[in-house]
Amino acid sequence: MRIKKNHFSVFIGALGLELLARSAVAKVSPTLLAEPDKEHQNLLHALNLGSARLRRNQ
């Protein structure tokens, strides 16, 4: 029982560290956290420029 609780605590700690690291990176530039894709829609969304599909229709 004790070992399982310790693994769970380590897991929760790792998730917390990941959230802190991602927030620090996002403060520098949110584009660093954007998932890469062919059409760069995630990058455009991170830059608050909308998506490529919306721009073509307008």
Image (spheres, rainbow, N blue to C red):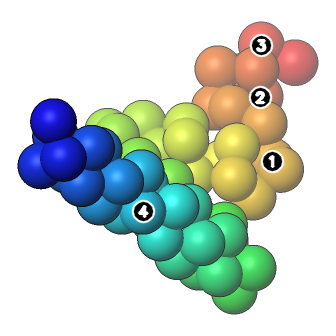
Q: Given the image, on which type of amino acid does mark 3 rest?
A: Asn
Residue 57 circle label: 3
Q: Residues within 10 Å of mark 2 (few under 14, many from 20)?
A: few
Q: Mark 3, mark 1: which one is toward the viewer?
A: 1
Residue ID for mark 4: 13
In terms of secondary structure, where does tag 3 sit? helix
How far is disc 3 from disc 4 in space, using C-alphas?
45 Å
Q: Work out whether mark 2 precedes mark 4 in sequence or the reverse, and give the earlier one.
A: 4
Asked whether residue 11 is in view, the answer is no
In terms of secondary structure, where does tag 1 sit? loop
How far is disc 2 from disc 4 in space, using C-alphas?
42 Å
2 and 3 marks in contact (CB < 8 Å): yes
Residue at 52% across / 61% down in the picture?
A: 16
Residue ID for mark 2: 55
Q: Is residue 7 left or right of residue 11?
A: left
Q: Nearer the viewer, residue 34 or 37?
A: 34
Residue at 42% across / 62% down in the picture?
A: 13
Q: Nearer the viewer, residue 49 or 21?
A: 21
Q: Work out whether mark 2 precedes mark 1 in sequence or the reverse, and give the earlier one.
A: 1
Q: Residues within 10 Å of mark 4 (few under 14, many from 20)?
A: few
Residue 34 circle label: none
Asked whether residue 48 is in view, the answer is yes
Q: How many marks?
A: 4
